[in-house]
Image (cartoon, rainbow, N blue to C red):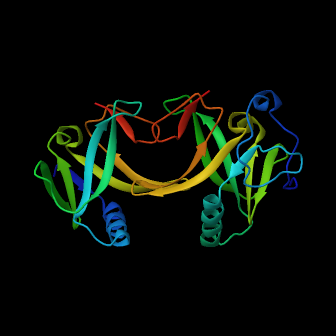
Amino acid sequence: MPVSVTPKAARQIRKALDQRGGGYGLRVAVKTSGCSGYAYALEFAEAPAPEDLSFESEGVHLLVDAKSLPLVDGTQLDWVREGLNEGFKFNNPNATANCGCGESFAV
Amino acid sequence: MSACQSQPNAGSSCSAGAPPPVAAFTLPEGTTPIVVSDAVVSKVTEMLIEEGDPNLKLRIFVTGGGCSGFQYGFAFDDVAKDDDLCVEVGTIQVLVDASSLQYVMGAQIDYEESLEGSRFVIKNPNAASTCGCGSSFSV
């Protein structure tokens, strides 16, 4: 699957959707910024947009726009606790370098 | 264990030019080495209940690494060392060791929750540049 989530990430996405009162799923996008060239952007989605590709993993809907897809193809989204912080972690096979916190990457 | 109170400035050469940020609390000598937000206090209080140990202190430290040269670290510690700055805010205690303090003097410690995750963050007047997420910085 082009984009997938771990069970932990799925649980977190469901929790976040519940807290905001529902929604279709999570959009995973890539923007040019950050110290490594690209940065991930996550947002709630009410419905797929025309340019979106929709995937289902662990029972949650993931949307990726066609332009971002080549940069995140094969990515697995995980939810990890690192020290006292917790957050989504992108395991992206296309990334050749990552920023310290994993928010930014290079291909 | 050292008493938890404000200590004489351990990094005087680094703090001389740092303007004191808006004080969330007042230290006896009029110095404000670090400012701890209410969000940090409530999150740490919640975490200590989860940990089942009300005596744990939040330790903030700086290590080499990250894309900008230095990065922040956060951990719980049950012991304050002699060279620690110890700041008591509400019900929690925050520790910064002397060598880390020179890099975070005057910084504001906050806790942010968003879709991406939940994390402790530092707004640091000493940082010349920071990494996208703010976990790494240069001076």
Q: Residue A5, percent across and down?
A: 27, 57
| Residue A24 appears in view | yes
* Front residue of B42 and A90: B42
Q: Residue at x 63, y 38 (%)?
A: B124
| B22, above or below A12, in the image | above
Q: Residue at x 78, y 45 (%)?
A: B32
Q: Residue B78, percent across and down?
A: 74, 59
Q: Residue at x 60, y 64 (%)?
A: B43
> Would residue B64 appear left or right of B24 to someone viewing this image?
left
* Front residue of B129 and B10: B129
> Would residue B62 appear left or right of A83 to someone viewing this image?
right
Looking at this rendering, what residue extends furthest in the left direction? A50
* Front residue of B75 and A17: A17
> Would residue A40 appear left or right of B139 to someone viewing this image?
left
The C terminus of chain B: image quadrant:
top right
Looking at this rendering, what residue extends furthest in the front direction? B22
| Residue B80 appears in view | no
The N terminus of chain B: image quadrant:
bottom right
| Res A7 → quadrant | bottom left
Q: Residue B49, percent across and down?
A: 64, 72
| B32, above or below A44, in the image | above
Q: Residue at x 65, y 72 (%)?
A: B52
